Amino acid sequence: MSWEEIHRDARALAWRVAGLGPFRGIIAVTRGGLVPAAVVARELDIRLVDTICISSYDDRAQHPEAVQVLKGLSGEGEGFLIIDDLVDTGETARAVRDMLPKAHFATVYAKPAGRPMVDTFVTEVSQDTWIVFPWEVERLSRGS
């Protein structure tokens, strides 16, 4: 996937959720949600952006592992838009939903297993597709 593709699809996500607000702010799910959240924030002219920091993949094996919340948020999320790059198995999304059940959850891409956990997405991809985002390319090519 190229930077141009993720930028185009993140803008499409912004347009898709634009009429669902107004949103008080955006919550990016780190790390993958940071880039799409920045694009959506700019498109929707939202300046309040925060993060939920979650670890849910073993980068060496590229398989889901136990979800670890590294930084959460208080409140129920009412009036906030949660942004992530991808919902895969839905485990990360479930942890985020448990923390912020009243927020609107939007992802750029959705796999079938995780799709029921999000409110809005742009493109569905097959469950066995492994998307390599442009911010991951160099790290993966180094083998780390």
Image: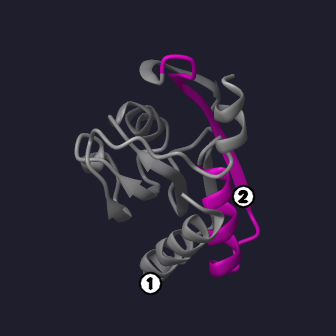
Q: Position of residue 136 (x, y in %)?
A: 65, 42
Instruction: Magenta stretch: give its range.
Output: 33-61
Q: Quadrant of the N terminus?
A: bottom right
Residue 139 horizontal side relative to residue 118, left or right: right
> Which residue position is annotated with label 2?
49
* Residue 18 to residue 128: above or below: below
Q: Which mark is residue 114?
A: none
Q: Quadrant of the C terminus?
A: top right
Tell me, yes or no, whether the highlighted magenta stretch contains residue 50.
yes
Determine the residue located farthest toward the right in the rendered image.
Answer: 47
- The residue sitting at 44% across, 31% down in the picture is 95
- Between 102 and 116, which is closer to the camera in this rendering? 116
Tell me, yes or no, whether the highlighted magenta stretch contains residue 39.
yes
* Residue type (three-letter) at the residue carrying disc 2: Val
Q: Label 1's element?
A: helix
| Label 1 Cα neighbours within 10 Å, binned few <14 / some 14-19 / many ≥20 | few
- Between 38 and 124, which is closer to the camera in this rendering? 124
Picture quadrant of residue 128: top left
> Which residue position is annotated with label 1?
19
